[in-house]
Image (cartoon, rainbow, N blue to C red):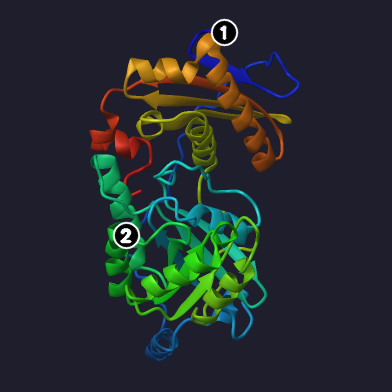
Amino acid sequence: MSDQSIHSHSALDDVDERSLLEDADVDLFDVEQDFDPFADLDDDELDAMLAKAEGGFDATASGAPEGFRSGFVALVGRPNAGKSTLLNACFGQKVAITSPVAQTTRRRMRAVINREGCQIVIVDTPGLHKPKDSLGSELNKSALSEIGDVDVVAFLVDATKPIGRGDAWVAEHVAASRATKILVLTKADIANPQQVASQLEEARKLVDFDEELVVSSTEGFNVEAFVSVVASYLPEGPKWFPDDMGVDASDETLVSEFVREKVLLHTREEIPHAVGVLCDGFEYKRDLLKLHATIYVEREGQKGILIGKRGEMIKRIGIEARRDLERIFDTRVYLELDVKVKQGWREDQGQIRRFGYSADE
């Protein structure tokens, strides 16, 4: 084993390589330049089509029963307010990574929550903060873009930490949104009653909320109440996604994120913020999923810390990531990790886009 790679696998040491499929050329249908899809319709048929369109969307046409509610809710707040933990609790399974490190969430993730009579698409956003680099600016832009494009905005506030200028800055954007506004006070399991009462009082001064809830995502307290409250404010609409739809993240993205989570959990100081991960190998072979991911840092010293003495750190990261990935993909996983240095990538818009952290992604 080299000092910068680790193979993490389940009950398998040697795996036969399978040749990768080459991209195949696909012939596209030729399209006539002057094609008119309505050429065969008479005036009465065209009028009927327009009248139906003006009457709005028929939810039942998508398989949804009459009175079905559906829509989007964005979770916003300061870093470490508990957004990803609440999403996981609502979804009933860990799909968004979590850690004590600020700015753990770098990608918007949408999770589909299906309940009787409704479908809720929860959008987990990066924590809003004062940016120190181009990456931070992109994360803020990504989070703020969701506030104006959802039916409900849930403003998450940590019950254990006094509301400060950062919360007030987030609240300004929440207040400007035309969406329904819900205050969600998180981490109730580790807050005392005095903290909860004080936080509620201070938060009410920031935004005119339509609803407020106190929750503990880790204990499941008021999680279903949150789902019910959000559903009550959604418009009638279609099932935007099929019932078996989980999250909108690609498989490669999930691999990258769960590897990065383990880096965050096992390193401190400047390492977590300097780390970017790309899944650059994804191949199914019978009942085995072969994965390769590259962890990028900005300095040689950071690379040495990640690899650790005799490769112990990178080995631990690989083992723990593999366990999560086996649960997610429900199969045995062979995971190989490499560590590389890419100086100053957090200030490089091209690299930020390459990692999938751009607000336009």
Quarter of the image where one finds residue 17: top right
Q: How many marks?
A: 2
Q: Nearer the viewer, residue 250 or 258?
A: 258
Depicted 200 relative to depicted 344: above or below:
below
Q: Which mark is residue 164?
A: 2
Indicate the amino acid at tag 2: Gly
Depicted 135 relative to depicted 80: above or below:
above
Rendered location of residue 70, percent (x, y): 53, 74
Q: Secondary structure at mark 2?
A: loop
234 vs 43, left or right, is right
- Residue 143 showing in the rendered view: yes
Q: Which mark is residue 175?
A: none
Q: Farthest front residue?
A: 194
Rendered location of residue 315, percent (x, y): 58, 19
Q: Name the residue tied to disc 1.
A: 1
User: Residue at point 28% right, 30% down?
Assistant: 345
103 vs 338, left or right, is left
Rendered location of residue 322, percent (x, y): 63, 30
Q: Secondary structure at mark 1?
A: loop
Q: Which quarter of the figure is the N terminus placed in?
A: top right
Depicted 354 relative to depicted 194: above or below:
above
User: Residue at point 31% right, 62% down?
Assistant: 170
Are the two marked residues, 2 and 1, in contact with CB atoms closer than 8 angstroms? no
Label 2 to label 1, Cα distance in Å? 49 Å
Q: Nearer the viewer, mark 2 or mark 1?
A: 2
Quarter of the image where one finds residue 304: top left
Indicate the amino acid at tag 1: Met
User: Residue at point 65% right, 52% down?
Assistant: 93
For disc 2, the neighbor class at 10 Å (few under 14, some 14 to 19, many from 20) is few
Quarter of the image where one finds residue 46: bottom left
- Residue 359 showing in the rendered view: no
Q: Nearer the viewer, residue 40 or 205?
A: 205
